Amino acid sequence: MSGRAPSLARSSVIEVPIMQHAFGVHTFGFVWNETAVEALGKLAQQGFRKFQLLASDPHFNIREHGSSEWVAVRDQIASIDGNLLALDLPVGDYNLASPMPDVTQFAIAAHRRAVDAAAFLGASHITVGSGRKHALIPAKSGVLEEIFRNSLMTLADYARERGIRILFENHPLGVFPDAASMNELLEQCAIDTIDVVYDVANARAIGEGPCTGLELLRDRLRVIHLSDSMEGKWQHAPIGSGQVDFRNILQTIQRIGFEGDIVIEIISEDPLADAVSARVQLKHLI
């Protein structure tokens, strides 16, 4: 397929100084207490200009195409000279790998609305997770994988027609939770409008070393999510509160020549203050 974006992490090792990266912020942590417009405004006041936006009530409703809420968010992004990297749906609410066709179709329809909203807002991507596996009665190997593969290809076609790319994210509950399985799937699909967002905390939740995952997916990486966590726990905790070796991760990011976006994604009681603190701490490690 046509329209492949330039690789953002090159196989020929050309180190890219981390200081050139202006850290972005995901609004996930603001979902219950701030509207998208409010969160973007407060983040902009702290100097942030790159964002990932969660499309979930009461934060941001994408069900009404071109609504006054859509217009308000688009106008806010323009007024703060912002860059909306991607629009995300809450993975827990939409299962693109369900064995029940009506559930899968519901999820595909929701992601299509996300594509339309992303195009309206001026984003370049929507984020897609690989569905969900049942922890107690998982399906036979290959069943859910094939369902998700078909969902992903359907969405990629729809998004490409509207000038939107896909960000495929690692998720601990997903059908393709780790870097190796994600990479294998993308090689099989051979769709050049799918990039990868690699979440460090999600990787640690399944016991994957983040630096190993970053190295493996280096040629597909577009966004990297940073947050902290304790060993053996699935968290998106404030930077410095857990056990993530951010110095090593930042060195890996530089070594692989990553030229995409680094996004702070923290879920806490004060996500604004913790985003500002994360930026300070990460820059101190560079």
Image (cartoon, rainbow, N blue to C red):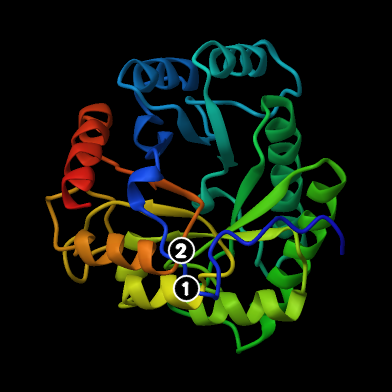
- Name the residue rendered at 57%, 75% in the picture: 182
Question: Horizontally, is 62 left or right of 85 in the view?
Answer: right
Residue 164 as seen in the image, left or right of residue 206: right
Residue drawn at x 77%, y 56% is 156
Left or right side of 258 for 247: left
| Quadrant in the rendering for residue 193 | bottom right
Vertical position of residue 46 compared to residue 55: above or below: above
| Mark toward the start of the polypeptide (2 vs 1) | 1
Residue 52 bears which disc, if any? Answer: none
Residue shown at 29%/42% (left/top)? 267
Image height of 218 relative to 87, above or below: below
Q: Is residue 238 visible?
A: no
Badge 1 amino acid:
Val
Is residue 195 or residue 257 the one in the foreground? 257
Tag of residue 13: 1
What secondary structure is marked by label 2?
loop
Give residue 258's position: percent from left, percent from top. 47, 60
Measured as percent of width and height from the top left, residue 254 is found at 37, 62
Q: Residues within 10 Å of mark 1 (few under 14, many from 20)?
A: few
Q: Left or right: where does residue 66 sit relative to residue 202?
A: right
Is residue 229 visible to the viewer in this orientation of the structure? yes
- The quadrant in which residue 61 appears is top right
Mark 2–mark 1 CB contact (< 8 Å): yes
Q: Which element is circle 1 on?
A: loop
The residue indicated by pointer 2 is: 257
- Where residue 168 appears, x then y in whole percent? 59, 60
The number of numbered badges drawn on the structure is 2
Quadrant of res 41: top left
> Foreground: 44 or 139?
44
